[in-house]
Amino acid sequence: MTAAALAALAPALPARAGGRSHVIVVDKMAFGAAPMGIKVGDTVTWTNRDIVRHTATARNGAFNVDLPPGASASAVMNRAGTIAYYCRFHPAMQAQISVSA
């Protein structure tokens, strides 16, 4: 590929290649505290320690992960902002994460 072609593709690439990983634990029917310092390109992993199934479903459609009992699932944060999310099975379970550019 030529340099011009690569430059044209640059806006489509993630802001940060090889971002960091962050973990949010789901326990006792609640999402744990969101880690600080999440940036675009980072991966957030939710780990379900409950005996029932949960989801982490972003209200803006940014992610939707299924969490069977004892499982973990991840999503890459592709946009900056505060993202509110909830569990589809237990709508009272709500939280938010802040993602910076």
Image (cartoon, rainbow, N blue to C red):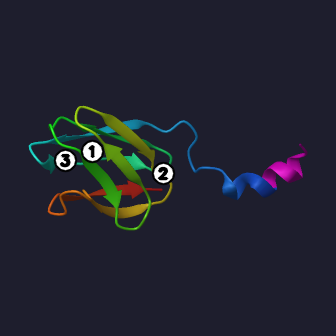
**Residue 21, percent across and down?**
40, 36
Q: Gap in Å between the C-alphas at discs 2 and 3?
A: 19 Å
Question: At 80% from the left edge and 57% from the top edge, which residue is drawn?
Answer: 8
Within-10-Å neighbours for mark 2: few <14, some 14–19, many 20+: many
Q: What residue is shown at x 8% (from left), y 43% (from top)?
A: 28
> Mark 1: which amino acid?
Pro
Of pointers 2 and 3, the one earlier in the residue sequence: 3
**Residues in magenta, as a range:** 1-7
Say what secondary structure mark 3 lies in: loop
Q: Is the stretch drawn in magenta largely helix, strand or loop?
A: helix
Mark 1 closeness class: few <14, some 14–19, many ≥20 residues within 10 Å:
few
Q: Residues within 10 Å of mark 3 (few under 14, many from 20)?
A: few
Q: Is residue 79 left or right of residue 34?
A: right
Which amino acid is tagged 3? Ala
* Numbered badge on residue 35: 1
| Disc 3: which residue | 33
Read off the residue under disc 2: 40
Image quarter of the N terminus: top right
Mark 3 and mark 1 in contact (Cβ < 8 Å)?
yes
